Amino acid sequence: MNVLWLQSGGCGGCTMSLLCAESPDVLATLEGGGVSLLWHPSLSEASGPEVVAILESCIAGTTPLDVLCVEGALLRGPHGSGRFHVLAGTGRAMIDWVRALAARARHTVAVGTCAAFGGVTAAGCNPTDACGLQYDGNAAGGLLGAGYRSASGLPVINVAGCPTHPGWVLETLLALALDGIAAVDLDALGRPRFYADQLVHHGCSRNEFYEFKASAEKASDLGCMMEHMGCKGTQAHADCNVRPWNGAGSCTSGGYPCISCTEPGFEEPGHPFFETPKVGGIPIGLPTDMPKAWFVALAALSKSATPKRVRTNATADHPVVTPVIRKTGFK
């Protein structure tokens, strides 16, 4: 399976993340899965005219293009010309290259939230008119249009995340190599369901604190970061705490609140990332699937039942009260 990887308006962080794949590493995994990397701007030796020849060969259909991966937002400005990002040495706007290649690709994959929805590149006044491949924030459309379908009949596959997890990218590519992704395997935003049908909250190391609403009050506290620190792990779709990053950690495990980077529009939450907006003391962003009345009732009950150990440790940077030792048998 031939894969072509292009980078547009972004930081390159998704490629850096991909290189963190291990056991085996990214190149060994792709080779083992029968994936041939036609070209990647950071991983391939080819440059200049050699690269242009590869792209033109794909557009002409001479070289089969099984998967077009795009990392970074697509820069449509100024005035729709795309001249803010011209592919070096070609005089042609990157958005024109992407449109032409996407028309040939069997599958088109957006790697990272910038390529999927616009991401950080599209934040603020968005002077470059950045957007995703098939979304502009929450709105379907983007560069290729809401009706775009690749040769396989699928919409753009959005492997969202900022950066995206190396396992999400590799599993997507390996699944495509086996024709293992159909429309039903994508959620309503085009994200592979194998990771998007889960919440960051699942498997969070702070779940005991969440259960008792024992909350962190400042950075480095061990408690749940939902109530005061802006954490959106109960709303963000991803398996970050089930599938640890680099085999060991995640944002919440490291003391950083989840900012919901797999969701469109995460870059502009309307409030500081480290603050939880509230009305009448109740967080606005309640856990997914949970009615407000139930949350209020359960939160009050949980706080009234919080063990001293959990309450004390929630506002400490290390456990200061250890669990009581009790006999677990019935004798």
Image (cartoon, rainbow, N blue to C red):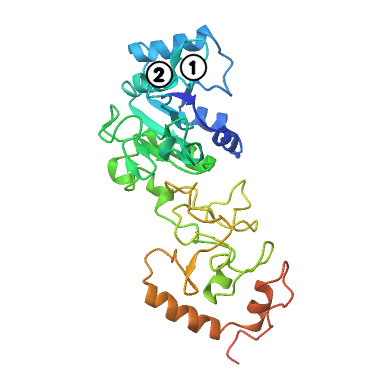
Q: Is residue 31 in view?
A: yes
The residue indicated by pointer 1 is 87
Q: Where is residue 243 in the image (x, y as percent from the top left)?
A: 53, 51
Q: Which of 318 and 167 is in front in this view?
A: 318
| Residue at x-position 67% and y-position 80% | 309
Query: CB of mark 1 within 8 Å of CB of mark 2?
Result: yes
Amino acid type at circle 1 is: Leu
Q: Where is residue 61 in the image (x, y as percent from the top left)?
A: 33, 13
289 left or right, relative to 37: left
* Image-quadrant location for residue 181: top left
Tell me if residue 265 comes above or below residue 111 in the rendering.
Answer: below
| Residue at x-position 37% and y-position 39% | 136
Q: What element carries label 1?
A: strand
Q: Say how many tags the image has.
A: 2
Q: Nearer the viewer, residue 101 or 244?
A: 101
Q: Is residue 177 in view?
A: no
Tell me if residue 35 comes above or below residue 229 in the rendering.
Answer: above
Separation of residues labelled 1 and 2 (CA atoms) = 8 Å
Q: Which quadrant: the N terminus? A: top left
Q: Position of residue 185 (x, y in %)?
A: 33, 45
Tell me if residue 190 comes above or below residue 96 in the rendering.
Answer: below
* Image-quadrant location for residue 316: bottom right
The residue indicated by pointer 2 is 97
